[in-house]
Image (cartoon, rainbow, N blue to C red):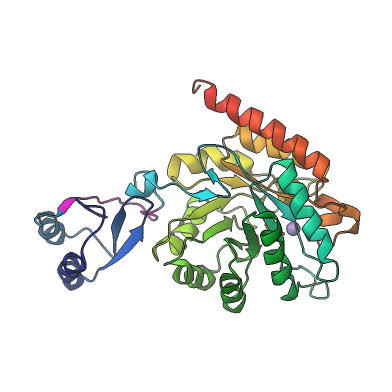
Amino acid sequence: MILPKSPRLTPAQLAEVTAIVEPFGCSVQPIVGAIRTIYAIVGDERDELMINRLEGLDYIERVDRIQSPHKLMDRRSDLASHRITLGGVTLGDSLLVIAGQCTIDPKNPNFLYETAHAVKEAGANALRGGVWKPRTNPYSFQGDVKSLDILMEAHRRTGLPVDAEVMDETQLHLALDAGVHMLQVGARNALNYSLLRAIGRAVADRKTIVLLKRGLHMGPISEFISAAEYIVSFGNPNVLLCPRGTAPALDGYRNHPDESITPLLKEKTWAPVVVDPSHSVGKATYVPACALAAVAYGADGLCIEAHVQPSHGIGDDPKQALTPEALATTITQARHLWALRRSAKPI
Ligand code: PEP
Ligand code: MN
């Protein structure tokens, strides 16, 4: 990773740096942070001669070598000072809450408009709404592109930034063209490397945030972080890691709750952790406790399914969406706990 002395390299400097690394089979990928741009060396960056040549340039502050399979996402990466902001919340400064429907009902857009106002009132910072849905049963409702307009209309009515899952490149470009602020990669696509690459490429020059769910299987932590590296390696470091429960399920729950991996993630990566308690436990009555557990484990944010009238919702909403009242109580308690945790001395 190359750190210039100035906030970014000039085109001539970038060309010179590129000319140095290319003979060693490497390339240079700028990663644009809020304050400065750093330059990842893509490829095997261990060659001493290449490093010496780079360090010999008078406009280079230093060249950091991190031997990690996910060197950009690594805690020791220079990206560790990168801050991600959504809906007025800078991750790490206060608790981010994304809330809204599992699935937008294209026949009943008013539900989403009402839900959007209600989650805002309850204290959420961003609105989620499933446009296209990954369904286990091929005969279940699969989502509808019409819902994208409904989601954007909910954004216009409330000012809340919006989050939607994309499962392929067509959906990805439709969502970006519509102005979706956060793209969700679902648990079923968490290790779909060609989708992760396509997303990385598509958001490289944008400020779009990607909420990357953890895969369904109980995979290693490094696999989860490396999936984020796929996206970030194209140049946009706005990635949030989202544990959402894994299979096999804990008897009685939808999945095996995994908010407990938060401290492990934080030990290895700088990426903010936004836990999804809804898919983890899968039932509205269990969601508040799981949300609070996530905050106790150190989560930076929560992604919670909520609906003005859960029983009239579609997709997961009838079983796991919180009512606006339950959401408001959960957010208030979660923010208290977050503040308590922050003010307490580390144990
Ligand atoms: C969802 O967010 O509604 C969803 C399908 O999530 P996951 O990919 O975690 O199952
Ligand atoms: Mn859902």
**Residue 295 screen position, x and y as percent:** 62, 35
| Stretch in magenta | 60-72
Write the residue at 44% across / 59% down.
Answer: 229
Spot the residue most to the right: 311
**Residue 251 screen position, x and y as percent:** 80, 45
Residue 48 lies in quadrant: bottom left
Write the residue at 75% across / 58% down.
Answer: 102
Magenta segment, prevailing SS (helix, strand or loop): loop
Residue 262 lies in quadrant: top right
Write the residue at 58% across / 73% down.
Answer: 172
Kindly tell me whether residue 132 is visible in this rendering: no
Residue 59 lies in quadrant: bottom left
Q: Quadrant of the N terminus?
A: bottom left
User: Does residue 268 appear left or right of residue 169 in this picture?
Assistant: left
Q: Is residue 10 above or below residue 118?
A: below
Residue 324 versus residue 169: which sits nearer the camera? 324
**Residue 219 screen position, x and y as percent:** 57, 54
The quadrant where ligand 1 appears is bottom right
Q: Is residue 294 above or below residue 70?
A: above
